Amino acid sequence: MYQYILFDLDGTLTDPKIGITSCVQYALHKLGIEEPDLDELEPFIGPPLTDSFREFYGFDDETVQQAVIYYRERFSTVGLFENDIYPGIAQMLERLKQAGRRLAVASSKPTVFVKQILEHFEILSYFDVVVGSELDGTRVKKEEVVEEALRQLLCDGNGHDIVMVGDRKFDVEGAKAYGIDSIGVAYGYAACGELEEAGADVIVETVEELEKALW
């Protein structure tokens, strides 16, 4: 049984596709690049924005920073709420909390936005700790986020009662960096085979399967 549970946000607790991809589309447009198909921008869901703009569009550091500014220009007011909580998540969190589990969010999204989203969906109260990245671009790597979440949780476990739940390889890698278990959720945005290749300890297809895996 896992006493300490770290959850990714995007693609794990909520489906942020419209918000994230529309804001990437907006940023690219401001930089003179047109991408009409939001499906093509799905790879931006999960990893740090800076890494994605650099990897997918070959931007230099200055352009990456400008792209992030444009992205947040729309995300902070509109894109933040173009989001849906997955059915069953709130009920699962409530049951875990009632059972005395200690819950955390460990996201690469800036903490200020993470908290706003959790408040919007009325699930912030279930979490003992909420950790994201900083707006200045620090603590964006998942292993850094996991480290800080574990520090704030003051985990006194031996590693076998701690788990990271996420939908991308970055979540699995972040867990492995600290020797804790990982559960990959296949209902998120991982590419086919991504979670298996990353070495997730368990892979679930639905929120219902996830809850069973956490008990």
Image: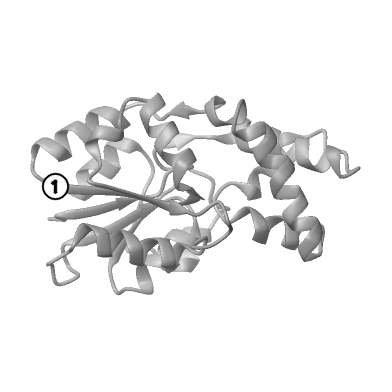
Q: Quadrant of residue 206 in the image? A: top left
**Picture coordinates of residue 28, whole percent (x, y):** 81, 43
Label 1, on which residue?
Answer: 101
Residue 184 in view of the camera = no
- In what quadrant of the picture does the N terminus appear? bottom left
Residue found 25% across the figure and 59% down from its top: 152
**Picture coordinates of residue 188, whole percent (x, y):** 48, 43
Q: Amino acid at mark 1?
A: Arg
Q: Is 97 placed above or below 199 here? A: above
Residue 170 in view of the camera = yes
Residue found 14% across the figure and 72% down from its top: 158
Colour scheme: one colour
Left/right placement of residue 199 relative to residue 182 reads right
Q: Residues within 10 Å of mark 1 (few under 14, many from 20)?
A: some
Q: Quadrant of residue 38 in the image? A: top right
Seen as rendered, the residue at the extreme right is 32
Residue found 15% across the figure and 38% down from its top: 97
What SS does tag 1 mark?
A: loop
Q: Nearer the viewer, residue 9 or 110?
A: 110
**Picture coordinates of residue 26, whole percent (x, y):** 77, 35
